[in-house]
Image: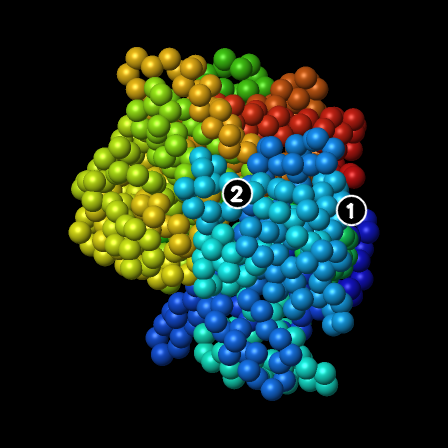
Amino acid sequence: MTNGLARASVRFRPASFAGSFVALLFASAIVTASGTLLQTGLTAHLAPVRYASTPVLVAADQSVQISVEHGKDASTTSMPLPETARVDAALAQRIAAEPGVAGAAADFTFPLLLSPTAARTDGSSAQPPLTGRPFSAAAETLPAGTAALTAGSAPGPGEVALDSDAAQAAHLTVGDRITLTAPGTPESAGVTGAASYRISGLVADQGAPGEAANAWFADDVAGRLSGHPGLADTIAVQPRSGVGTAELARQVRQAVGPGPQVLTGDARATVEQPQLGEARQMLTSLGGSFGGIATMTAVFVVMGTVALAAGQRGREFALLRAIGATPRQIRRTIATEAMLLAPTAGALGVLPGLALARWWLGQLVSRGAVPSGVSLSVGPLPMLAAVGAGLLAALGAGYLAARRPAKLRPSQALDEAAVERARPGVVRTVLGAVALAGGVVLATVAARQAGDAAANTALGVVMCFLLAVALLGPLLARLATTVLGLPLRSGCAGAAGSLAADNTRANARRLASAITPIVMVTAFCGTLLFLQSTISHVSAQQVRSGIVADQVLGSAGPGLPAGVAGRAAQVPGVDAAVGVLRSSAVYRSGDTLASVSVLGVSGDPAQLPRVLDLGVRSGSLDALGGTGGAAAVRTVALDVQLAESLGVKVGDPVPLWLGDGTQVRPTVVATYQRGLGLGQVLLSRAALADHVAASFDSQVLVSDAPGADRGAVAAALGRLGVPALTVTDAEGFGVQADHEQSISNWANTVMAAVLGGFAAVASANTLMMTVLDRRREVGLLRLAGTTRRQVRGMLRWEALLVATTGLLLGGAIAWTTLVPVTRGITGSSPYIPTAVALPLAVAVVVLALGSTALPGRALLRARPVEAAAGKQ
């Protein structure tokens, strides 16, 4: 009987189940997409290209790891390093002494700047990008029996060998000369740090398509030019004949001891593609954090929609009780209906979810956040989780909605089905009050925190307030309609407005079902979009206020040679010139690791205020110094928000991991206010240069002397002879800073669009369900003499009441969440641009009007007598 009743309900009342089906389908798509991204992050890998013929590699651990204790248990938290960690190149000799090793060579890469006057046989000056490498690594990374040189001889002092395809594309051959600048080229080589090299030979190509071509130097020359002599990115190991990879790895591991990693298989690709580790973490964080939010939202929406659909059938349940149905049979009917709907809707939502995940990954690849070789990992677990979450949510919501009518006596059930209950249940009210109190407590805690600690509480604040709105919805709806309905009851909106005000107040429970999804749209989109707009706005303000330089030198290539700042300072009309070297560092925040931007500034710190006004809050930048090496990282200046987050002040040591994993504890000598836009950690360039992949300056900030002709100074700077040199003003610094935030901003926008779109569909779905359920009510109004125009006006005013209430509640949640978070991250209040807020509000109003107008027209097409009788 139960199964037949459930099938009949779905078959003969499809409109009652269409809303639940749509909610389940979209929920499945969202959960599938986020779960697939999470699985892709956990399993992302690439096949090695450069080291495809090298079975074993030795490299340093490319991550920072900390141990986190949870009572008696402990776990490890790790984070990829922003720069390349290196190993001692002398390990190659120790490895080569093992009996199973045929050869071992230290390998490393460094970018090269090409002189615009580099010679070519056709007289052209264009050159392809090049990457420097030691020549000994060429033989160890080629297949056995393959000759490294295709022409000429190995490079010696003052010589270089080029990849054969790159040389052919540039019309260069053995004996030609090429002018190059490397990170380790001494400044005495000239303003550009360039040197001329004779092409001694051509080498077989080893890179992947799209990678920069290789320029091979003698080993000692390459080490000096890289800026990191005695260190290597990796050590390539070749086996003797008959030695397998496993045995070779065992011997190498024995030779190197603890510390360095011995890599085989696809793990070798992490050396070629260092951004793979960051891509894994980003995909894992994106799929995990967004997946958690999306899953909670999906369950939230599904439970609300299914509960609404079940609540609309209160009269049906009461009649079933009246003809002898037991409470157990009604609960089984709800369960059977969920089993009929949820698996089908969940299965249909899997394909759209996979399409969303594929599009998302493709966008990340196109923006350079994920290496191009990473493919989407599709597995059954995200799909099963999506279907299972929808099924459990549908079962739980149906049981809760049918619990009370199933327990009541038939006569009581009929009475409650005819008239809406005036007040929600005691349990629901208590739980709602607890959720509201939890949101207030979390918001208060966030207001006392700084940085990431404040941001990490945002989700808890939003979810607590949304749960409170869902549980206390009827009370909030009654309060809102009482206040907002006053102008309508005064007669200013005519009979339709007065009717809408009285109707919504009398049916607060139904109104609450329509308000909750709109609150979700406003709260989620408002929090994500306005957090992003606040960070971008404050960052741009800090750049505009902080860059006081008259000229900003940049480069379209990998950077500017270290000597450019010094030579720029000698240009007539220049008062001061400071080189800026960009990197990142890692710090511990509680039980998590986070990264911050680092600026290394050259020259005398006393000249820094002439080009960069950081807004020093305490201490002095004059004490900032260092001459290179880990021991030289003795002093540091911190952004005031970061200092508060770490709990340090001037004179305290601060533990940091520099970009290459070197752990330091410099003393804080100053704190400043404009770190979000300019850089949250400030070091001397000399101290930072040894810990970056390539010590090319990102920019050189130039201050003109008083009375100097700005145009003449800019022209003189442009004649320095630096490859791909650009000369701009302070906006040039801001453009690069904005570019670095673009991926984060884009990710927030996509998350807001996905969650907001899902909540918008749920809102439209719920509004349509509530309107279509009013067939009997509309029919009675028509029989009482209400015109079609008045009914349509009533529905429009009700939609405006719903939209206004949802916007006010959602806006209050978003604001309450944003205030402590933005103050912790930026030190300022939320910035809400009209260009973002107005379209969001208009979209909510249009959504509410459209979702009530369409089903309202359908109701008005029915004959009033039939509609009043409840005929479908």
Dot 2 alpha-carbon crowd within 10 angstroms: few under 14, some 14 to 19, many 20 or more = some
* Residue on which the image places disc 2: 195
Residue drawn where x is 40% and y is 75% of the image: 74
* Image location (x, y in percent) of residue 192: 48, 37
* Residue on which the image places disc 1: 14
Q: Is label 2 in a helix, a strand or a loop? A: strand
Q: Is label 1 in a helix, a strand or a loop? A: helix
Determine the image quadrant of residue 510: top right
**At label 1, which amino acid type do we have?**
Pro
Q: Is residue 347 visible?
A: yes
Q: Are marks 2 and 1 in contact (CB under 8 Å)?
A: no
* Image location (x, y in percent) of residue 33: 66, 53
Determine the image quadrant of residue 287: bottom right
Residue drawn where x is 25% and y is 54% of the image: 634
**At label 2, which amino acid type do we have?**
Ala
Residue drawn where x is 60% and y is 86% of the image: 99
Determine the image quadrant of residue 241: bottom right
Q: Nearer the viewer, residue 775 or 431?
A: 431
Residue drawn where x is 59% and y is 28% of the image: 843
Pick whichever of labels 2 and 1 is earlier in the sequence.
Answer: 1
